[in-house]
Amino acid sequence: MPASDHVDLNGFIEGVKRRNPGQSEFVQAVTEVAEDIFDFIGDKVQYHEAQILRRIAEPDRVVSFRVCWQDDNGNIRVQRGWRVQNNNSIGPYKGGIRFHPSVTESVLKFLAFEQTFKNALTGLPMGGGKGGANFNPKGKSVNEIMRFCQSFMTELYRHIGADIDVPAGDIGVGGREIGFMFGQYKRITNNFTGVLTGKGLEWGGSLIRTEATGYGAVYFLQNMLKSRGQDVAGKVAVISGSGNVATHAAEKIVALGGKVVTLSDSEGFVHDPDGITQDKIDWVKTHKTHRRGRISDYATEFKSATFHGGGARPWGVPCDVALPCATQNELNGEEARTLLKNGCTAVAEGANMPTDLDGVHVFKAARILYAPGKASNAGGVAVSGLEMSQNSARMSWKEEELQTMLKDIMSGIHDRCLEYGRSADGHVDYVKGANIAGFKKVADAMLAFGVV
Ligand code: NDP
């Protein structure tokens, strides 16, 4: 047996740290997965011999490039863009583009790594990738955003393609930005093809793509609750974020008879004990997306609410269920303990890796219903996969058909988590289930390809 077979979990993590200096988010994501995978592959020599986990934790390639653009005052600005193509063993690379000042290579590598498992879990043929830039869209004019998107795509276009790598949106990238990038791709290549998802309905987009991540997270929550004979109806939900995922998760909770009492942004959170109804959610969508406003204004608009500033997070508000839907590491171990103390019994992550490693261990040890983002937020990429199918077939499915497919995909992911996450006493560790099910699919494909 090769010497590396004898590396234990700690040795493996030490190696990941050594090879990726200063990339704490990437190391965190790999650690969380490795904790479960080492257990699973303990007696499976084929995965050791082929060094599968080591290979999945080494991106196929990381492309980094300069993005120059001109602001409205004529100043030349320089940003850094990336595309991380993590693994394409089961399909073309697929994953969003993020524009946020906090974007680094480490953040995009963690997201592309997570995406590899998530995409495998959907059951659709998609590999894992992620991209973005350290560009801050806040405070920029529409023309500045357009010029940035065009400059970004002027480099990115040579690395992507409908059968190569198909990006989508993420934080800071919505329908408008996808439009600007698709327009530039089409202009450079003279090729109208399904190279991006999250497109407008008039030019190749799919119905329910916008809603899919938030709705999917709530469908996953519904599946978990059902396994304990419970339902979303009557449950009090604490949600973080106020962007695409948070507002659509809130919308679905309300539609199913639950009560949403918080939303947040990077400045703080609003607590509305009367409940954030559909009318109020519509106001938030318009205010945050179209007016680029702040969530603090909610408390001025709706007198039943209070705003808690200074970057405060909502996890101290008592609830039955929690849905972190803003960003990575927004819920730590202490906050996880507070949620439990206040009676929270289910957590479904809408964001990617919103719970830090300490928090994950707290939820796992408490044996609550805890769904990691790679399982519960996969609805978005799943409908992106369906958008790719519709583009290839030059057709579009009706809304009801897509709603049914989304529900089926989310319950399929739930079943896959049960398969590998259920212990003898019936408890389900969804983190373990998702990690192993995602790993196994990618790993078996990699074994078939030999050493490449
Ligand atoms: P949006 O840009 O629409 O919204 C992001 C929200 O998170 C905003 O409310 C934003 O507040 C808040 N936020 C961002 N950074 C921070 C921070 N550092 N601290 C506190 N709040 C912050 O993004 P999405 O809703 O699309 O994405 C949210 C999460 O869901 C991300 O983790 C993303 O990767 C994940 N996700 C998204 C998918 C999608 O389909 N869009 C698919 C799967 C996962 P502010 O306005 O102040 O910046």
Image (cartoon, rainbow, N blue to C red):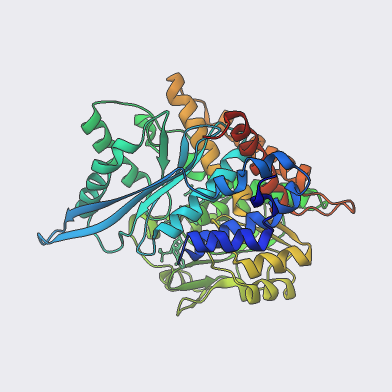
- Image coords of residue 86 (percent x, y): 48, 44
Q: Is residue 49 above or below residue 186?
A: below
Viewer-side residue, 419 vs 264: 419
**Quarter of the rendering containing residue 404:** top right
The total number of labels drawn is 0
| Residue positioned 42% across, 55% down in the render | 171
Q: Seen in the image, is 51 located left or right of residue 245?
A: right
Residue 46 position in % (x across, y down) = 70, 38
State the image quarter where residue 167 is shown. Answer: top left
At 67% from the left and 40% from the top, the residue drawn is 440
Question: Up-down: is 357 above or below 440?
Answer: below
Q: Is residue 381 above or below residue 324?
A: above
Q: Residue at x 83, y 51 (%)?
A: 229
Answer whether residue 336 is visible to the viewer in this image: yes
Residue 233: % across, % down: 72, 54
Tell me if residue 28 comes above or below residue 227 in the rendering: below
